[in-house]
Structures are given as structure tokens and as C-alpha cells.
Image (cartoon, rainbow, N blue to C red):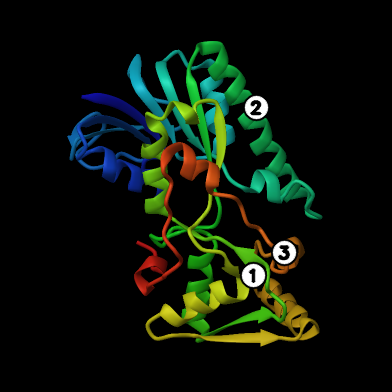
Amino acid sequence: MRDALVFGGSGQIGSALIARLAPADWRVTAVSRQVRAAGPGVPANGVHWLPGELDAPPVLPSRVDVIFSCGPLDGFARWYADAGIDAGRVVAFGSTSVETKQRSDDPFERDLAERLASAERALFARAQDRGAALTVLRPTLVYGVGRDANLTRIAGLARRWGRFPLPRGATGLRQPVHVADLAEAALGCFDRPASHGRAYAVPGGESLSYRDMVARVLACLQPPARLLELPRPLFALALHAARISGRASGLGDAAIARMQQDLVFDSGPAQRDFGYCPRPFEPVDAMFRRP
């Protein structure tokens, strides 16, 4: 039996990963901000949940076969820099934002990209010092269990309004990726030496325009919602009103501009090195309902 330590175990990716580890002859220690299941340190479905977080971790095992990081990459990099745990294998989730937001007009987005890049550099350097094999996985738009901040948010607004507006020309390509495929990627690369010391894009299995992606989400809702494509001046007025009312917080001008930009990534290296095979984008209503 192998031992795994999972950070971010109660998050959307971490939950999907643990659901696969626990029945597959793994002993899992998962760290969560809140006490889970039967209580701290008490096994629940093969998982030992410990209350804590990266900046204030609980007492952890001295040795595990692998550490999976499914939470914020910069926080994990800070913890890993000084962690005394013996682990020969580390798999950490980052984001494709490390590339897509480097030259954003939004300073907060540029800062995010730099924090991700700095965290990756620090992790690879520290893993090399320790003789550990690190793999970083960079997802695209994550969806699947109603806990993402993108498509589930769109679905929630569309349910409330019965419609959802987009500016005309939102033709930039996207590759939404299901959380279950990311969990399979983490497991798939674990014992593949070709993935050691590398970072991989892990996009979804289909490229489609931003407009068509949103249209599929709206069509799968129960009841379906209507897509409104507005001329850009009219959309700008509607967005201004939504920002004033607080309904469009976090939707900046840089995010609107990216709707016209292709944000696509090559899954070939991940397919070659650890058999990554993500599903096409076939959404259903339950994927966008918050638990």
C-alpha cells in the first residue's frame, strides 16, 4: 500500500483525486481548513483528514510516497521550501494563467501570472535539491462539480435572469476541462518517469469558441437560458450597469478582451508521456449546480 499526502483535498480537484485514490489501495492523508467526516485524524472511507492549511499545517507524516497539491500553487511553494517531509514524488496543480496573463492590461492578472511562474521556479529548484521528482499540471477552464468560478458563475446568472449577454465577436477558442480528467492526469503521471521535472498543459478534449462554450452551458440548464449577443457599445453599457449593482464583480476589461483571443494549449506532450485523454465538452445541468 502506498501513502499520499493531499493538500486542497476538499477542493474540486482534490475531491475528485481522493475519490480515486481511496479505493485504489492508497493510504491518504488529506489536509483541510475544516474538520472533515468523523474528525481530525480519524479514517473516513480510507482517508485521514487533518485540520489545517499550508500556512499553518498540522502535524504531518514524516514520509509519504507522493505529495499532491491541488490548491494554490504559490502557497504550496512556500510550504514546500521548508517542509521536512520525505517524499520522492510531487505532483502540483498550477494554471495556464501563467502564460495567458503575462502580458495582460490588468496589473492584478499580471501579478497572478508572475506569482505562478515564481512558484513553479521555486518548486522545481527545491525538488531538485531534495532529489524529488516534480510534475506541474496546468489546467485550462475547470468545470464539472459546480465549484468553479467561471462557467458555474455564468450558469448561476443565467438561471436568475433566464438569459446571458455576450458581446458579439466572442470567438476566441477555449478548452474547458472536467475535474475528473484532471484527477486522472494526476494519477496517470504519478509513476511515469517521462513526466519527472516537467510542466504540462492539461486542457479539455475539445476546442470551441467562447460563444459556443457559453451557448452549450445555457442550453443544458433546466430550464435552458437564452444567449443574448449584443453590439459592443450596448454590451459595455450593460456591463457598466452590472458592475455598479455588484453583479459583475471580477469581470474586468481584460477578461472581456480575452473573449476574442484564442487560449488553446497542446495536450500532445501529456498524451505522449502519461496517456492523458480528456473528454469533449458535453455539459449537463448538474455540473453547474453548487453543492
Q: Is residue 57 visible?
A: yes
Closer to viewer: mark 2 or mark 1: 2
Label 2 neighbour load within 10 Å: few <14, some 14-19, many 20+: few
Q: Name the residue under label 2.
A: 121
Quarter of the image that includes the C terminus: bottom left
| Gap between marks 1 and 3 measured at Cα | 20 Å
Is residue 75 placed above or below 130 in the rendered structure? below
Q: In this view, does 258 lie to the left or right of 35?
A: right
Label 1 neighbour load within 10 Å: few <14, some 14-19, many 20+: some
Closer to viewer: mark 1 or mark 3: 3
Q: Which of marks 2 and 1 is nearer the N terminus?
A: 2
Is residue 139 placed above or below 166 in the rendered structure? above
Q: Which of 261 and 196 is in front in this view?
A: 196
Q: Is mark 2 on a helix, strand or loop?
A: helix
Is residue 175 placed above or below 59 in the rendered structure? below
Is residue 234 placed above or below 278 in the rendered structure? below
Residue 251: image location, x then y, percent: 67, 65
Q: Which amino acid does label 2 sit on?
A: Arg
Residue 97: image location, x then y, percent: 65, 48
Q: Name the residue under label 3.
A: 261
